[in-house]
Image (spheres, rainbow, N blue to C red):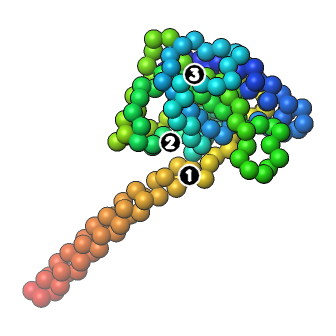
Amino acid sequence: MSALTLQFTQAGLNALLSATQRGFKGKISHMAFGDAAYTPSKTQTALKGEKERVAIVDTDYSDGETSELKIAAKFDAPLEYAIREIGVFIESPDHSGEGEPELILLGVYSQENTTLGYRTPDVKVLQWLTLSLAQIPSDSVEVKVGVDNLNIIVDRELADMALVQLNTMQRQIEQELRLVALEQAQ
């Protein structure tokens, strides 16, 4: 997918500029997958074949690059389809804070006759995207990480791994104590 570039939409850029003019940043909050393959247009306001839309679960600012931003979303619905388009959404700058915010399509990744991946019901997809922000005003966006961020996603796995390590250490200590007792008995 490195050959694809994000096609920013006019609606997304207008929302960013509106937020910036009022002293706020545009909040990138959601990512979506769809099954339509096409050349994205600046006038788009939606994905052509959207199948799933989820909240961003992680972001990585550690690259040191001010013009790039990494975001991740976890797709885990029991669906099956070819992934041919990816959309990135921002919250409307006019959101009053009550209810669910309106989401505006900021940009689209897609290409005619190109499949980016495949979703199956049994496989969860953790999709990382690197967004080049060189075409928008500097320091005009931030990432709104959803409730189920990656720290929570790996919580169960980390707990299981810690338990296995503790059990292993306990067995090693018990074995060492038995060895010491045998040596003292001689």
Name the residue nearer the viewer: 11 or 126: 11
CB atoms of marks 3 and 1 within 8 Å: no
Q: Quadrant of the C terminus?
A: bottom left
Q: Which residue is mark 3?
A: 48
Residue neighbourhood size for the residue with mark 1, other residues' Cα within 10 Å, grouped as few (<14), some (14–19), many (≥20): some
Residue neighbourhood size for the residue with mark 2, other residues' Cα within 10 Å, grouped as few (<14), some (14–19), many (≥20): many
User: Would you place residue 114 above or below residue 24 in this image?
Assistant: above
CB atoms of marks 1 and 2 within 8 Å: yes
Residue neighbourhood size for the residue with mark 3, other residues' Cα within 10 Å, grouped as few (<14), some (14–19), many (≥20): some
Nearest to N terminus: mark 2 or mark 3:
3
Q: Which residue is mark 1?
A: 148
Which residue is located at x 42 percent, y 59 percent?
156
Which of the 4 image quadrants contains residue 13? top right
Point out residue 22 in the picture as x, y percentages from the top left corner. 90, 36
Residue 36 vs residue 101: left or right? Answer: left
Which of the 4 image quadrants contains residue 70? top right
State the residue lying farthest toward the right.
Answer: 22
Q: Which element type, helix, strand or loop, lies under badge 1?
A: loop
